[in-house]
Amino acid sequence: MFDFTLAAHSPDDIAHVIQVSLAPAFILAGLAQMLNVFSARLARIADKVNATARDLNRVNPAEAHHLSQELSYLRRRSFVLDAAVVCVCIGAGLILSSILTLFVGALRDAAAASVLFACFGAGLLFTICGLGAFLTEILMAGRGIRVEVDRQQDQAATVEHS
């Protein structure tokens, strides 16, 4: 599709590769914003779980059943949010991988540009690793919410049977 064979002294070719690789950066900016929204939503779910869990310990059995259903709903929401985060992180990782592939492909015959490409490529690799770490943290937070929901539901069931 693109011919990126670079000569040792071809700054115009290097600039062209960088320009082509910057187009996906706009997609990445949008994905980063989506991840920011997902993080905020997860925090809201966690706050609701905590508030519902506190209320669950103070109510009668009929209200406890209703709050237990609310916790189940919040648990399902956290699973859906986890799926959204995973999809966006995989998408961002693949976009970054494609940019990295573009740079590696352009490096085939370009020894003189290797420092430039190595720096940019390393930046992409670290960004991919950062997305992976973020994904792991979000999944851990979601799991924490579900553990708390399960714990509170177990307490509610114990209260209902007493």
Image: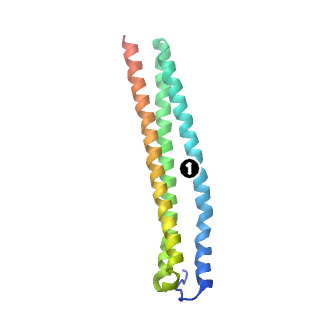
- In the rendered image, the quadrant that contains the C terminus is top left
Element assignment for label 1:
helix
Residue at 46 percent across and 23 percent down: it is: 68
Residue 110 seen in this snapshot: no
- Color theme of the render: rainbow
**Nearer-the-camera pick, 99 or 70:** 99
Residue at 42 percent across and 19 percent down: it is: 156
Query: Percent position (x, y) of residue 35?
Result: 56, 49
Amino acid type, label 1: Leu
Location of mark 1 (residue) = 35
Residue 32 seen in this snapshot: yes
Query: Percent position (x, y) of residue 74?
Result: 50, 32
- In the rendered image, the quadrant that contains the N terminus is bottom right
Q: Taking 157 as reference, is 59 left or right?
A: right
Residue at 51 percent across and 43 percent down: it is: 81
**Nearer-the-camera pick, 118 or 31:** 118
